[in-house]
Amino acid sequence: MKNETIMIVDDEKDIVGFVKAYLEKEGYHTIEAYDGASAFRLWREHRPDLIVLDVLMPKLNGLELCREVRKESRIPIIILSAKSEEDDKLIGLDIGADDYMVKPFSPRELVARIRAVLRRHNTSAMGSRIITEGPLVIDVEAHRATVLDEEVSLTPMELDVLVTLASRAMQVLSRDDLILMAEGDDYEGYGRNVDTHIKNIRRKISDKTKDWNFIETVYGVGYRFQARKKT
């Protein structure tokens, strides 16, 4: 079963019920709203994974709602509309919608588009994630690590090792597992090289702060990431 929650927003209750039944059959959770104002409130309260959004609605239309949501979030949005003109589609996409479907629509196509949009969004989110542990901040997409807002000059390999450890905080990783997760099956180096990378990471971080430890050696096993302030 899927864990994603889809918000369905349309003033036509029959359409909401139809989409809800189909999505739940496919394993999605759903939240329903019948006007833009209540949809905005429910979105802030529940933070769903994707919004399926009609354009013509009372109180706050779909385009206005899309604009308001985009001020705060990059949540995926698929617009459903009876308007099929190219200009209407372009307006929807220009204000931040991820996709645009014209009514009447195929529920199978809607589900396929939801899957595709979520897949693209989740892949992008993985690449752009920020890891924060104490004074250490790692911007994965920017390939950049800072401590107390000062950049740590890490080699690509050192950064890969640090990201791998920090992504699995408190988990003990052996040298071989660490190098495999960081560099993949094609890495041709020696597992013991990880020790040198860890040593360099520790030294470079300690140049920025001597008050914190981040990487713990688990003797006979490997390494564990744990941000701890020295006592």
Image (spheres, rainbow, N blue to C red):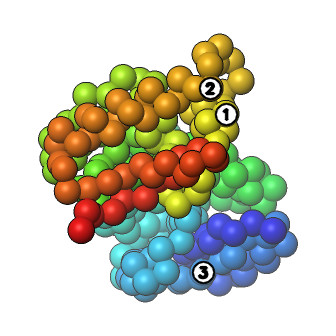
Residue 92 at least partly seen: no
Q: Residue at x 66, y 55 (%)?
A: 114
Q: Which mark is residue 124?
A: none
Q: Which residue is mark 3?
A: 31
What type is the residue that disc 3 sits on? Ile
What type is the residue that disc 2 sits on? Gly
Classify residue 101 as left or right of residue 23. left
| Front of the two marks 3 and 1 | 1
Q: Is residue 50 above or below residue 141?
A: below
Task: Report the front residue among 190 and 101.
Answer: 190
Quadrant in the picture for the N terminus: bottom right
Q: Which residue is mark 2?
A: 191
Residue 179, percent across and down?
60, 31
What type is the residue that disc 1 sits on? Asp
Q: CA distance from mark 2 to mark 3?
A: 49 Å
Find out whether the residues at labels 2 and 1 contact each other: C-beta distance under 8 Å.
yes
Number of callouts = 3
Identify the mark nearer the N-term, 2 or 3. Answer: 3
Find out whether the residues at labels 3 and 1 contact each other: C-beta distance under 8 Å.
no
Residue density around tag 1, few if under 14, some if 14–19, many if 20 or more, within 10 Å = some
Q: Which mark is residue 176?
A: 1
Residue density around tag 3, few if under 14, some if 14–19, many if 20 or more, within 10 Å = some
Quadrant in the picture for the C terminus: bottom left
Q: CA distance from mark 2 to mark 1?
A: 5 Å
Residue 24, percent across and down?
78, 74
Q: Residue at x 59, y 44 (%)?
A: 222
Q: Residue at x 71, y 24 (%)?
A: 185
Q: Secondary structure at mark 1?
A: helix
